[in-house]
Every structure is written in C-alpha cells, then in structure tokens.
Image (spheres, rainbow, N blue to C red):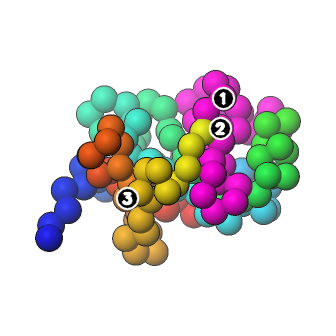
C-alpha cells in the first residue's frame, strides 16, 4: 500500500539548524527536534513563515523553556513531548495533544509522519 505524504520539505534552512543547536545547548535534556510540515507557510516552504517544531524532552525542560525568554521567537511554535506521548506548547498560546492521537510514525532516522485533519498524512523531518 502506498502512502500519500504531502509537503515534503527538501532542505531545511541553515538558520533553523542554528536555532535548534542553540536551543539544545541551553537545554541539554532535549533529545530530538523535528520540524512539522503541515503548519508551514503557504506553499509548503520550510524556509518561510512560522516553524512548527516538536522536541522530545521532559516536563522539567518544558518548564525551563517556558521561563527562558531568550529562546522564544514569534516565528517558532515549539511543542515539547514530555512523556513519549503527550506534548504541550513551550510558549505562546497554550495547546497540546498526544502523539498517539495524530498517529505519529517514525519512517526512518530522519523522517516521521502523522495525521492531520483526520485523514491527511504529513511529513516531519528531524532537524537534529
């Protein structure tokens, strides 16, 4: 069976990699960071608009990120997975969910997919 995964970013911008490196230097408990494809700017470009990042860490790191205004950016929506399933936003509008509810699947070391809008499978790319 072939999967239809939309919005495949081909190359992530260097600025995003530098931001994630700085984020992980300040908060070393962050294991992985993924950029999500579904909420990028119109046209599916990973180089413009708001970056939607998903980081894997713990609840102490989420609290530290909430308090660390030096990493807050208006063009970054950072969601933190705290227990392997539940995620919450690290700043801005409070939101969250569960990876199990979006059918998060690791495709390989560098890509994952998830469901949005009830049926559309989107791609996530591991940043670092």
* Residue 106 within the segment the image draws in magenta: no
- Out of 81 and 125, give the one closest to the viewer: 81
Q: Position of residue 93 (x, y in %)?
A: 64, 24
Question: From which residue to which does the magenta span run?
Answer: 68-95
Q: Position of residue 116 (x, y in %)?
A: 35, 43
The image shows residue 42, relative to residue 114, as above or below, that is above
Q: Position of residue 122 (x, y in %)?
A: 32, 50
The image shows residue 85, relative to residue 65, as above or below, that is below
Q: Which mark is residue 89?
A: 2
Q: Is residue 97 left or right of residue 101?
A: right
Q: Secondary structure at mark 3?
A: strand
Q: Are marks 2 and 1 in contact (CB under 8 Å)?
A: yes
Q: Which residue is mark 1?
A: 94
Q: Which residue is mark 3?
A: 113
- Out of 81 and 36, give the one closest to the viewer: 81
Q: Secondary structure at mark 1?
A: loop
The mark nearer the N terminus, 1 or 3, is 1
Q: Residues within 10 Å of mark 1 (few under 14, many from 20)?
A: few
Please tell me which residue is depicted at 15% across the width and 67% down the height of the picture.
2
Distance in Å between CA atoms under marks 2 and 1: 6 Å
Q: Residues within 10 Å of mark 3 (few under 14, many from 20)?
A: many
Q: Is residue 81 left or right of residue 108?
A: right
Distance in Å between CA atoms under marks 2 and 3: 19 Å
Whether residue 102 is visible, yes or no, is: yes
Quadrant containing the C terminus is: bottom right
The mark nearer the N terminus, 2 or 1, is 2
Distance in Å between CA atoms under marks 1 and 3: 23 Å
């Amino acid at each position: 069976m072939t999967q239809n995964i939309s919005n495949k970013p081909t190359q992530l911008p260097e600025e995003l990699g530098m931001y994630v490196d700085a984020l992980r230097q300040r908060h070393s408990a962050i294991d992985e960071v993924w950029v999500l494809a579904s909420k990028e700017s119109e046209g599916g470009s990973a180089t413009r608009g708001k970056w939607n990042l998903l980081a894997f860490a713990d609840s102490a790191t989420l609290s530290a990120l909430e308090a660390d205004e030096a990493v807050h950016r208006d063009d970054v929506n950072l969601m933190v997975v705290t227990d392997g399933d539940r995620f919450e936003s690290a700043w801005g509008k409070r939101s969250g969910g569960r990876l199990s509810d979006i059918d998060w699947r690791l495709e390989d070391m560098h890509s994952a997919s998830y469901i949005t809008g009830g049926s559309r499978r989107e791609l996530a790319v591991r940043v670092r």
